[in-house]
Amino acid sequence: MSASPPIIDVAGATQRFGTRTIFRDVSFSVRRGEVFVILGGSGCGKSTLMKQLIGLLPPTAGRITIGGDAITEESGAAERDRALRGMGVMFQSGALFGSMTLLENVMLPLQMFTPLPPEARVAVARVKLGLVGLADAAALMPSEISGGMAKRAGIARAMALDPPLLFLDEPSAGLDPITSAGLDQLILDLRRDLGATFVIVTHELGSILAIADRCIMLDRHAYGDEGGIIAEGDPRRLRDESTNPIVRAFFRRQVPQTAEAA
């Protein structure tokens, strides 16, 4: 039996702003049902690549397909719409609307994109909040909850339309170690229970090693003054086996030898 096609395929993605190249020739694929992490140091282009993947930033060059549908500018509107409807996104801060309760925040995609009647939207939103451990917090406002709860609520909203693909931007940023570990476990539980594919942008080493099946590592000097991929694979193997000094330093929390010698 042949393997199923990847849910994401990126070929030669490049991003330039004026004369500055953030990264170039980024190519990778994401398999269905895996937790895939985009990692690297600050300023390497992780968030820029995420914006390309979710359709907010058209790449300067290259091609990106989601579920077989292209999302780059040359693709048709129907093809692009199919691709974008198949994903949910949790932004770094949770990006909850402060004037809405958690329940109303999760209901919003259902209100915008489905014909469900109000009582059905409420029922679905309550189920999603229950999946992330917030069943008892539905009536709370974002100002009344912790940072970890806001992240969970953001994930619940991203799951509102049952997308097969979930993008999480820095889900552990700003969280204490215990809350961060709980969020890592939630991601693994959702992957197991729902069969969802996760693409996560992070530089949190503990989370990377705890949840990632595979990863790519970006570096802003992969090609001299231009960024790109410097490593790809199982992060635990990269930690133990990579000979690249930048990769080794990242996974061992060390100053790279190249930087020490400078």
Image (spheres, helix red, strand yellow):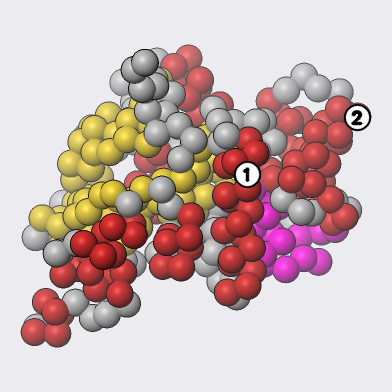
Side of 130 relative to 225 (left or right): right
* Other residues around mark 2 within 10 Å, as few (<14) / some (14–19) / many (≥20): few
Q: Do the residues bearing badges 2 and 1 touch, measured as CB atoms within 8 Å? A: no
Q: Which residues are magenta?
A: 140-155
* Other residues around mark 1 within 10 Å, as few (<14) / some (14–19) / many (≥20): some
Q: Which residue is mark 1?
A: 190
Q: Residue at x 28, y 49 (%)?
A: 233
Is residue 69 shown to the viewer in this render? yes
Q: Which residue is mark 2?
A: 119
Q: Position of residue 164 (x, y in %)?
A: 55, 31
In the structure shown, which secondary structural element does the residue marked by tag 2 occupy?
A: helix
Question: In the depicted view, which residue is nearer to us: 122 or 181?
Answer: 181
Task: Decide: is 115 above or below 217.
Answer: above
Q: Residue at x 18, y 41 (%)?
A: 25
Side of 138 relative to 58 (left or right): right
Q: Residue at x 26, y 59 (%)?
A: 238
- Rendered-image quadrant of the N terminus: top left
Q: Quadrant of residue 86?
A: top right
Q: Position of residue 194 (x, y in %)?
A: 63, 35
Depth check, mark 2 against mark 1: the one in front is 1
